[in-house]
Image: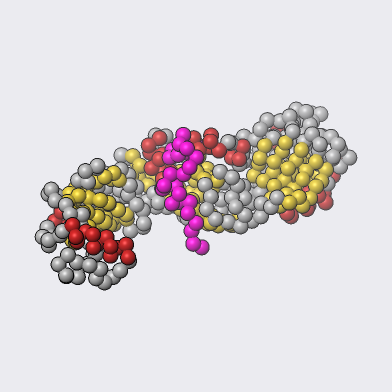
Amino acid sequence: MNTTPRTRTVVGCTLLVIALGASGTACSGDGSPLSAAPYDAADQIAFNGPTKDGKKADPDKPLEVTAEGSDGRITDVTAKDATGRYVSGELSADGTRWHSTSPLAADARYTVRVSTEDDDGAPGRRVLSFDTGKPLSKKRLDVTFGPKTGKYGVGQPVTAELSKPVKDEAQRAVVERALRVESTPAVEGTWHWVDDKKLHYRPKEYWPTHATVRVRSNLDGVKISDRLWGGGRAKPLKFTTGDRVIAVTDASSHWMKVYKNGEEINSMPVTTGKPGFETRNGVKVVLGKEYFVRMRGTSIGIAEGSAESYDLPVYYATRVTWSGEYVHAAPWSVGSQGSANVSHGCTGMSTDNASWFFKNVREGDLVKVVNSYGNTMEPFGNGFGDWNVAWNKWRKGSALVGGTPETPRPEERARLRPQSV
């Protein structure tokens, strides 16, 4: 233990040096120069990590830091691994003990910085380093992110596919905490568990225009359960957004208006689903574009040879559901476009209008249908209906922020901070 005398005057001078940002002498009770540098607290601090060279810590056990003796207390502990992942923890009210509350990663190198103060308030510091061993379990949870790298519309959700199911809420929280989404400009957003193996991430509102979104996994080596550890095979993702393009189709007026960054750029007559085949209401995300598609009634359950049966070559087809709803050229129904709904669920328009639409939208742009007698677009399973879920309900699908106020937690605010590009 450092035995250099310290007085209340020393504390006052140290605080003054810090406040002034000075690097030289500020004052002294006995006329001697004093330094604001923390003293070495090595003899005051103990931890439950390995003390012998070459020995590795058990990642199954929490990290514990304690204050030795009665003449000092812990004021702060920061622990992180070589990849920059922080370990959360709790400090006792009397400053005698700190312990980790999030799991340590396996096969990782950790640095722990402990700040202390003695009975006179003088600051001390100890830095600890240790390695963790490999996990005993061979079961690893890998993650695949979507979409692919590229440029998308502002409605594009982020997806995460897990290699194994995760059902327990506490285990989901471990997984979700390690799946990081950062955008520039920063926006509030969160993950939503679609099922045991799939998550979607979206902002509270649409992505900003011309934003950069980065997605990565910090799961490698993280313990999820006694028999499951995070794997390292998760390729990071980066994509950008373009302009804010939203096409709004009013099924009752048989008209579509297209907006770019809030300004109307086109208006055109359309036809939507007739009775029995009503077009889905709500917001859909463009899934892709196909110049030519052969559309058959059998693909949506219409018996071949029936009165409703069809088999048509279709051009300029912009897909909005996996089940076969498109915005496409329908030259056979031009006479009804703008006045009646005669399709089997798609939004039809003239070839010229469909060509324009095809050329001016991209994957991730938004197509909204209003005033249809159809059901609302499904949130999941048939494309991206994510935006039809109210924000408070979306948040409840998160294992971290579900049921909490809309203000992000401190760790969420840190994650949503703008990142350099």
Q: Is residue 387 magenta?
A: no
Q: Residue furthest bottom?
A: 24
Q: Is residue 413 magenta?
A: yes
Bounds of the magenta segment: 397-421
Q: Is residue 74 left or right of residue 4?
A: right
Looking at the image, how many numbered discs can be counted on the residues? 0
Horizontal side of residue 330 vs 86, given as left or right: right
| 418 vs 115, nearest the viewer | 115
* Residue 401, position as x, y percentages in the image: 45, 39
Viewer-proximal residue among 302 and 101:
101
Residue 232 visible in the shown view = yes
Give the residue displayed 12% in from the left and 62% down from the top.
Answer: 4
Q: Main secondary structure of the magenta part?
A: loop
Residue positioned 66% across, 33% down in the render: 376
Q: Name the residue: 50% across, 38% down.
A: 395
Residue nearest the observer in this picture, 381 or 131? 131
**Residue 320 in the image, given as x and y percentages of width and height:** 67, 43
